[in-house]
Every structure is written in C-alpha cells, then in structure tokens.
Image (tube, grey):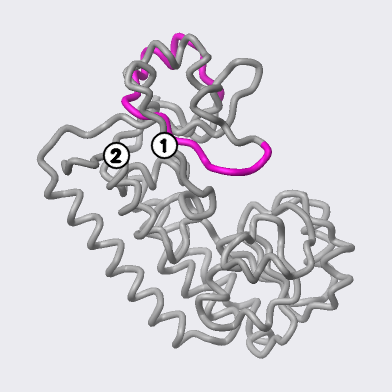
Amino acid sequence: MLSIRPSRRKLLSTLAFALSLPLVLSQTAAAKDAERIVAIGGTVTEVIYALGEGDRVVAVDTTSLYPPEATAKPDIGYVRQVSAEGVLSQKPDLIIAEAGAGPVDSINILKASGLDFVSIPSPPETSAIPDKIRAIGQAIGRAEKAEALATSVEASLKAIEDKVKTATGPKKKVLFALSLANGRVMAAGSESSADAMIRLAGGENAVSTISGYKPLTDEAVIAAAPDVILVMSGGAQHLTAEKAFELPALAATPAGANKAFLTMDGLYLLGLGPRAADAARDLNAMLYPEGQ
C-alpha cells in the first residue's frame, strides 16, 4: 500500500489549496461589497469576525461558536446539514461555506440560486491556515486586512513549530477520541485536523496508521498504547474521563493507568483557524507540564 509521509501530505495539501484558489476567487468579484453574508462553518465565521467584519454577517451555522457574539445571529443549521430555505430566508448577497458543507442537495440549491457562493478549501493541515484566511478576506473584499492577519498567524505557527523542534524529551502518544459508539472509540487518524494539531503541539498521534476518523477495535486501542486521551469539551456527545476509562481497552493503556485525560474546546482545537497556534501552545503545555 502506498504510504505518504507527513511532509509529503503537507506539500500535497498546500498544492491542492493553491490550485483551488483561482476557482474560489473568480466567484467573488461581485461579492466584495456584500452587506449580508451567511457564514457556514465555524472557522469561516471566526475569520470574518477577526477581520472586523462581523457586522456584515446575518446568519451562521451551529458550529460558529466564536467569538461569542456570533451565536446571537440566526442559525441556519449544522454545517453538514444546512437548510437551503433557511439560508435563502436571510436574503444574503454572499454565502461563504467551508468545503464539505452539506448536504449536497442544499449546497446545489444555494449555488443555483444566482447568489454569490464561495467555497473555502479546508485541508487538514496547519500550513493551509494562512491561505484560508487570505481566501476569506479576498471573498469579502478585505484582502489587505486578511494579509496582515495571515502574516501574523504564520509567525505564530512558526513559533510553536520551532519550540517543538527544540524539544529533547520523548513525545507523548495522544489518542484523540471523537466519541464512543457501541463501546468503540471513534478516533482521529492521519489526514485529520486532530492529527495536525497533535503534531503541531509536539505530540505523536497514537493511531496515525489509520486515515480520518474511524472506530477502533479493543485490540487496536491496546496496541496503540496512548499516553494521553484527548477529547472535545462540551456538547451532547461530551466524553468524560469516567466514561472513557470504564472501557477495559482504554483502562489497559498507559493513559488509563495514569488517568491521563485532556479536554479542549472543539472549535479552538480543531477549527484550524486564527487561534490554532494558541491552541497548540495550550495543548503543548498540558501534554508537557514539566517541559519537554
């Protein structure tokens, strides 16, 4: 089986993003002065607000939880289950959605509506964050602001990357558990935002041999031998340490033996937005409280 090394994956993701930009930008020429924007995707919303343009947003999806004032906007549904009717009822002149927004039928209706629709590529690599910011800024006619923010984010990402490179201690193996279903852990493998953030924070993904989010057998959990379990905080599917370590497979790992269990806000950790470097620094401090 062909195996793509992380550095090669990073290059391919960056190239894919770059190749997609001409299509994205060609759609936005008439939308730069949009006054009624519907933002679909928490990171899209976060970037628009970070650019100081939150007052132009008239509706958001349920993953748009930051900044807190965004939650006061009308809700058009979950990012992958948006209501086309709900979006159109907001009378937008620009719709910006993260790649992967859905369902397909709703997105096709929005694209066919005659309204300006911009899809923002979201490869699961931290290296793609600055270009994501630039694409959103270009879409809303704030390219200069976006360039300044992207440059600042690039510097922050490089700072945490440099910090991790100088670490001399062993890396901790981290298992990101998205949820539990039928007694199985839904874990994040390579080519996922969780994997990208674990690596940026100086950790090692305990299940990097799988791709994306997949359920693990008990044998796979034990073989992965994670030092730490990492989960998202809050929400209906919030996984607690008590629930996690009730599973014999997790209890049998080094993480279970040491009750090593970390929680972080989902959008902060996985959004791959302007705060990614801050999230990685926080995760690094939690993984290595005594230094690395």
The answer to whether 235 appears left or right of 146 in the picture is right
Return the residue at label 2: 287
Is residue 2 in view? Answer: no
| Identity, as a three-letter code, of the amino acid under mark 1 | Leu
Q: Nearer the viewer, residue 10 or 282?
A: 282
User: In which quadrant will I find the C terminus?
Assistant: top left
Residue contact at pointers 1 and 2, CB within 8 angstroms = yes
Dot 1: what SS?
strand
Question: Magenta span covers which residues?
Answer: 215-236
The answer to whether 2 appears left or right of 185 in the picture is left
| Residue 86 at x, y percent in the picture | 86, 63
Identify which residue is drawn at 68% across, 68% down. Answer: 39
Q: Nearer the viewer, residue 108 or 157?
A: 157
Q: Residues within 10 Å of mark 1 (few under 14, many from 20)?
A: some
Image disc number at residue 262: 1
Compared to residue 250, the image places residue 201 above or below, namely below
